[in-house]
Image (cartoon, rainbow, N blue to C red):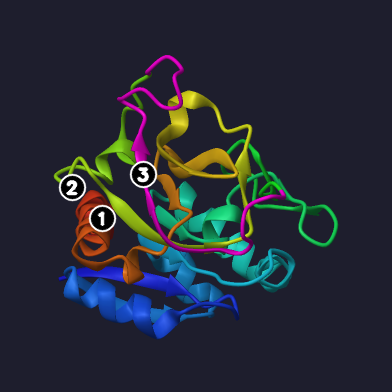
């Protein structure tokens, strides 16, 4: 079992995520205590709803704890709004600064498509052609999240905002809803998914297992 800490920022499907992580091989702790977060080497930041409330909840001691853990070698996976918080800013109900761990900005999906975007959507891996553009190959842990998963890959989304301006080399997969957006992205040990892997069936569990395996060394103190 791989120790995994789910950060409680006051908004999230914590029970579902904890159960999915346990099924994927995690020994799960859900906490909002900065000391526990700082000591963890495998962090998950979930979230649902608007950008600002969990961002405000993280300010101060919890944010410091996250940064301390990352500086000490922790891995981190943001999910849905937790993923959005990893970026530089979000524009929901006014501009709010994010954690700035990934480059990019979270903006509203275009008018003309149903919002919120709820349900299953296909991932476009960036090692194939997306929307007629040139292919590029994301490398490193973000791409490794999808290792061993089927080529035809569908995940479950619930959101109205999504990142834009994310450098191509950080994007492992995109999805299309009004515009193409980074659905899986990351830099170094900071990774995220716009969809909910805990609601995405066997493929979502496999993604969580890949993340836990990537974080295994850090969690064990290696």
User: Circle 1: is it few (<14), some (14-19), or many (20+) Cα within 10 Å?
Assistant: many
Q: What residue is rendered at 36% in x and 27% in y?
A: 138
Q: What residue is rendered at 48% in x and 54% in y?
A: 194
Q: Which of marks 2 and 3 is nearer the N terminus?
A: 3
Report helix, strand or loop for mark 2.
loop
* Depicted 107 relative to depicted 203: above or below: above
Q: Which of marks 1 and 3 is in front?
A: 3
Residue 176 highlighted magenta (yes or no) = no
Q: Residue 62 appears in which quarter of the rendering? A: bottom right
Q: Residue furthest bottom?
A: 15
Residue 151 falls left or right of residue 141: left
Residue 129 highlighted magenta (yes or no) = yes
Residue 166 image position (x, y, % from top left): 57, 33
Q: What residue is rendered at 40% in x and 63% in y?
A: 43
Which range of residues does the magenta coloring cover? 111-135
Residue tagged 3: 123
Q: Nearer the viewer, mark 2 or mark 1?
A: 2
Residue 104 image position (x, y, % from top left): 64, 37
Residue tagged 2: 149
* Depicted 193 relative to depicted 59: above or below: above
> Residue 207 — which label?
1
Residue 8 falls left or right of residue 19: right
Q: What residue is rendered at 44% in x and 51% in y?
A: 192
Q: Distance between the residues labelled 1 and 3?
A: 13 Å
Residue 77 falls left or right of residue 26: right
Q: How far apart are marks 2 and 1 (CA)?
A: 8 Å
Disc 2 to disc 1: CB gap under 8 Å: yes
**Quadrant in the picture for the N terminus:** bottom left
């Amino acid at each position: 079992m791989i120790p995994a800490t789910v950060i409680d920022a006051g908004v999230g499907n914590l029970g579902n995520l904890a159960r999915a992580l346990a099924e994927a091989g995690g020994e799960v702790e859900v906490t909002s205590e900065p000391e526990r977060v700082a000591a963890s080497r495998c962090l998950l930041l979930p979230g649902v709803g608007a950008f600002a409330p969990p961002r405000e909840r993280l300010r101060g001691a919890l944010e410091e704890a996250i940064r301390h853990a990352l500086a000490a070698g922790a891995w981190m996976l943001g999910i849905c709004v937790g993923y959005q918080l990893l970026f530089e800013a979000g524009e929901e109900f006014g501009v709010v600064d994010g954690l700035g761990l990934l480059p990019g900005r979270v903006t509203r999906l275009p008018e003309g498509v149903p919002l919120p975007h709820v349900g299953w959507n296909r991932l476009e891996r960036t090692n194939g052609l997306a929307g007629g553009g040139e292919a590029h190959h994301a490398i490193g842990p973000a791409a490794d999240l999808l290792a061993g998963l089927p080529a035809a890959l569908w995940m479950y989304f619930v959101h109205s905002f999504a990142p834009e301006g994310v450098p191509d080399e950080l994007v492992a997969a995109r999805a299309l809803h009004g515009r193409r957006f980074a659905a899986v992205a990351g830099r170094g040990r900071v990774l995220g998914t716009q969809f909910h892997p805990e609601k995405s069936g066997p493929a979502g569990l496999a993604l969580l297992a890949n993340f836990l395996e990537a974080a295994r060394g850090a969690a064990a103190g290696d």
